[in-house]
Image (spheres, rainbow, N blue to C red):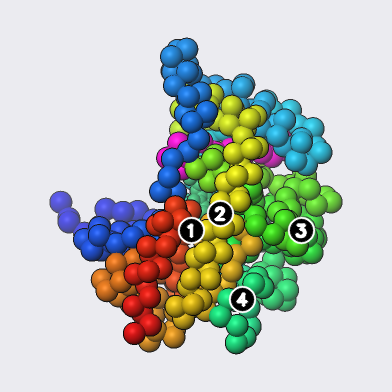
Amino acid sequence: MTTHTAVADRLSPFGTTIFSEMTRLAIEHDAINLSQGFPDFDGPDFIKQAAIKAMGDGENQYARSFGVPALTRALSDHWSRETGFEIDDTLSVTVTSGCTEAIAATTLGILNPGDEVVVFQPYYDSYRACLSMAGAIPRFVTLHPPANSAETCVESPFSFDESELRAAFTNRTRAILLNTPHNPTGKVFSREELELIAALCLSHDAIAITDEVYEHLVYEPETSPHVRLATIDGMQDRTVTLSSLGKSFSLTGWKIGWAIAPPHLTAAVRSAHQFLTFATSTPFQHAAAVAIRQGDDYIRSLVADYRRRRDLLADGLAEIGFKVFKPAGSYFILADHTSFGSADDVGFCRRLIEDQKVAGIPPSAFYEDPSLGSSLVRFAFCKRDDTLRAALERMRSLRS
Ligand SMILES: Cc1ncc(COP(=O)(O)O)c(C=O)c1O
């Protein structure tokens, strides 16, 4: 038997990521972890109690493949409330194992080999791998940091060239895969940008797959509200909206996600979902229904906490000497590290773990051309105030 890699060609380019090395180093150096996007505090008690109750009530066997009725109805009611569109949950909602499975089920269920898909970079890493598993061809459009400015804390969002976006759409384009609010830039796509994307989808008869896991985590709702692509004229019938429970309710380990789409696209999503997982955890779905129906107050206070933490981290990083791109959404901050003299993001993150004992993420792994991300570092602020303060305190030594 040969001993070289057993990983299939379509996955081998994504084999070992830099994240494994960073995690290993962070553990070895007992670093404060601002790298991974999960809270260092627990989710709300009323949702955990609902899961315990569901288990006690015997909700422990396979669920209906596309989701338990309590949750699909809670999601369709929430959707109507947010968009004004009435949908039939039995035809338009699919509950998945986190948004990660929703991304896989949607791409595998809809795309044929050779289909082109427009993707913004930097991108969430599973997009690239899912497109490869589906045999689809990504066409990248770059989100650029705000142009040179002397400010150390820049509030204007990352932006793309309209001509680059137009050129990415061809007669082979089957879909665009969008993420708003965006990881890792924190960009919240504006209505004008979404209208341009919608016009291109309509003129190329393309589907939109929109990952909205940070839908509630927006900090400037007056100037940068979260707009759902599905609500732009003409898009309701060609958009698959993906999201999950994890970020909005600080329960990232529960892995309850969903896809909301018109019936013909839902049928495609379900065609893959039934063979990926068939159904996801029954008691957690029941608890997710309670979260969606009763969670508004929790989300309001979480957003207030995250706004304060964003400001704390952004101001602190700027004071230390980073150039900070202040996010309007998500729970990540991108910052330029080049004033500290490292050659690239991987070298900077390695040094930050070893010397300052703080872990961040090198974002070059989120770009097709890694050099586009080499001046940047990503920090997560879904952490307690004390954790952020301690990390900033340790990073002050970067200045010396
Ligand atoms: C943009 C984006 N999409 C999807 C996910 C995964 O969501 P889930 O944990 O629900 O699978 C993440 C998690 O970090 C994310 O940042």
Kind of element beneath mark 4 = strand
- First along the sequence among labels 1 and 4: 4
Indicate the quadrant where residue 42 lies: top left
Amino acid type at circle 4 is Val
Q: Which residue is mark 2?
A: 306
Task: Locate the C terminus and report the quarter of the image it occupies.
Answer: bottom left
Residue occupying the point 29% across, 62% down: 31
Q: Which residue is mark 1?
A: 381
Q: Nearer the viewer, residue 59 or 205?
A: 59
- First along the sequence among labels 3 and 2: 3
Of the numbered discs in the image, which one, if any, rests on residue 222?
Answer: 3
| Residue contact between numbered discs 3 and 2, judged by CB atoms under 8 Å | no
| Residue contact between numbered discs 2 and 1, judged by CB atoms under 8 Å | yes
Amino acid type at circle 2 is Tyr
Q: Which residues are magenta?
A: 251-264
Cα distance between the residues tagged 4 and 3: 18 Å
Label 4 beta carbon less than 8 Å to ligand 1: no
Q: Position of residue 26 (x, y in %)?
A: 28, 61
Amino acid type at circle 3 is Glu
Q: Position of residue 370 (x, y in %)?
A: 45, 75
Q: Position of residue 197 (x, y in %)?
A: 74, 61
Of the numbered discs in the image, which one, if any, rests on residue 154?
Answer: 4
